[in-house]
Image (cartoon, helix red, strand yellow):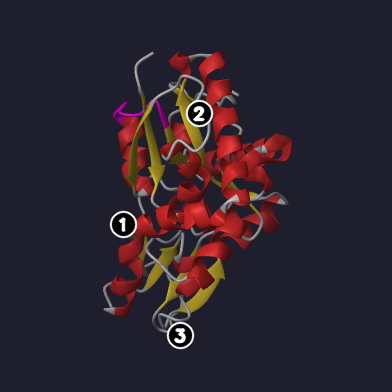
Amino acid sequence: MAPLMLGISTCPNDTFAFHAIMERRIDLRGLEFNVELLDVQQLNDGLFAGRYDIAKASFHAALLLADSYGILRAGAALGFGVGPLLVTASPSAQLQPESRILCPGRTTTATMLFRCLHPDVGQISHRVFSEITPALRAGEADFGVLIHEGRFTYQRDGLTLVEDLGASFERLADAPLPLGGILARRSLGQEVAATVTELIQESIAFARANPDDVLPTIRRHAQEMDESVIWPYVELYVNDHAVDMGDDGMRALQTLERRARAAGILDAGSRVLILA
């Protein structure tokens, strides 16, 4: 078959999980991939445009794309203590309806989560995740929602934690937070989807057994190069749910979906499908 268009993020959890696929360290079982590495909002936009056969996506986008794409059980970013953080450069700042908020993309789960938890705050604008910290320090917004490496470096960068949005969701929902997962075009069929799921699981196993082999790939794309940040990040996000999101992962996604519909963020529509 023709090469599959694969999109993943530049973040350490994805480059760790997909290294063995990208570098052909495992048997790809006859599949070929053309790989693009982009910011998660760019990946979401590419999926809406139909660019990818398989791609990492925010679960916010996955819920909106359920007619065309299903979710693979492997490769998800899901768990406890993995959520986005609301931060500020002004320790005395109070969140108000008129506060200016920077979020990392219109269809990111971080934006959905902020809107679910703070529906009265309306001045939301968007930046690439790596631009939010500099913008806050420059006074361009009152608060920002940090994802990826920013979760580990905000104190070093002089920012103050206002709220762990993931922890707030976990308390309300009594469930782990579903951030993002691997989507596959439904038209690929169950057999191809199952093979890709198995390849992701094998790629994660290879990376765990060969971290020195993976590190150059992570560093080629990461915003943060320090191993003291990279490895805790990988350990946090490439957890058991990354190998198989499991039934509790699906329940967590359904909980997020219900809350988003109740908040008016999602219309009634198709439900997500686990392909393999």
Residue identified by numbered label 3: 91
Residue identified by numbered label 1: 126
Where in the figure is residue 55, as x and y percent of width and height?
Answer: 42, 35
Where in the figure is residue 43, as x and y percent of width and height?
Answer: 35, 40
Where in the figure is residue 205, as x and y percent of width and height?
Answer: 62, 43
Question: Which residue lies at the image location 65% right of the left edge and 44% below the top edge?
Answer: 241
SS under mark 2: loop
Against 147, residue 51 (above or below) is above
Q: What span is in magenta?
A: 49-54
Earlier-in-chain disc, 2 versus 1: 1
Indicate whether residue 135 is drawn in magenta: no
Number of the front mark, 2 or 1:
1
Q: Residue 105 vs residue 193: left or right?
A: left
Question: Which residue lies at the image location 44% right of the left edge and 64% below the top edge?
Answer: 146
Question: Which residue lies at the image location 31% right of the left edge and 57% below the top edge?
Answer: 128
Against 221, residue 142 (above or below) is below
Residue identified by numbered label 2: 268
Where in the figure is residue 106, as x and y percent of width and height?
Answer: 35, 48
Name the image quarter holding the C terminus.
Answer: top right
**Amino acid residing under circle 1:** His
Residue 82 appearing in the image: no
Furthest toward the bottom, the residue is: 92
Q: Residue 77 vs residue 170: left or right?
A: left
**Amino acid residing under circle 2:** Ala
SS under mark 3: loop
